[in-house]
Image: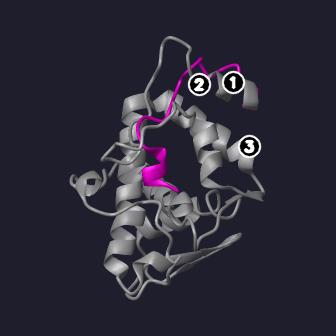
Amino acid sequence: ARVPLGGGGIEYPGSILMLDGSRLVAVHETAHQWFYAMVGNSQARDPWMDEALASFAEQVVDDDPPPPDALTEPGTVGASTESYGKNENDYYFVTYDKGAAALHEARKQAGDAAFDAARRCYGNANAWRIAQPSDVRAAFGDAGASSAAIMPPARLARADDGSAGDGLRAEFGRSDVAPASVIWGQSFGAWSR
């Protein structure tokens, strides 16, 4: 994560540094105790894996949706921190806002219960290790993504035919997750390399 210039906060395992008294920042930084501290990731290579999930959590807790145009803005959520150079605005907008917006769309497409079950499976399966983008894909299912998509894989979808998603039940031993509860839609690779 980049240190914010004006306000905000930063996460550390078991601790957060608050540069202002914002509830939004408190929720975001606390969410990092799960996504960054408990489920690690390469913050330089894959910052979306913790920042998008922390931003998503803050928006769910505060019932504050992401900016309405976040999914249509240019930029690849899966870009590395280095790839943004000195362009902090794009880094924050794409990694945090567009990433969270993709997760909100995924939750909407899959349904709250199915998405939340997959998110819990991801956390349980990857606790106390450094997760990779492929671990996210494994937890939410992979439907043989097409690289032709324009949008991020914001389309987790319910598949009622049992053709995908059974891996969630088998891999994580979750009998409460319905077959094919969630699958990645198009272009996982375009969103997170």
- Disc 2, SS: loop
Separation of residues labelled 1 and 3 (CA atoms)? 12 Å
Q: Main secondary structure of the magenta part?
A: loop
> Is any part of residue 131 visible from this angle?
yes
Q: Are marks 1 and 3 in contact (CB under 8 Å)?
A: no
Kind of residue sitting beneath label 1: Arg
Local crowd size for mark 3, using a 10 Å CA cut-off: few (<14), some (14–19), many (≥20) = some
Kind of residue sitting beneath label 2: Gly
Q: Vertically, is 35 above or below 141?
A: below
Q: Position of residue 2 (x, y in %)?
A: 50, 81
Q: Which residue is mark 2?
A: 165
Marker disc for residue 125: 3
Separation of residues labelled 2 and 3 (CA atoms)? 15 Å
Q: Nearer the viewer, mark 2 or mark 3?
A: 2
Marker disc for residue 169: 1
Q: Does residue 81 show up magenta in the picture?
A: no
Separation of residues labelled 1 and 2 (CA atoms)? 7 Å
Displayed quadrant of residue 93: bottom left
Residue drawn at x 75%, y 52% is 127
Q: Are marks 1 and 2 in contact (CB under 8 Å)?
A: yes
Q: Which residues are magenta?
A: 172-193
* Left or right: where 89 falls relative to 158: left
Q: Position of residue 155 (x, y in %)?
A: 39, 36
Residue drawn at x 59%, y 25% is 165
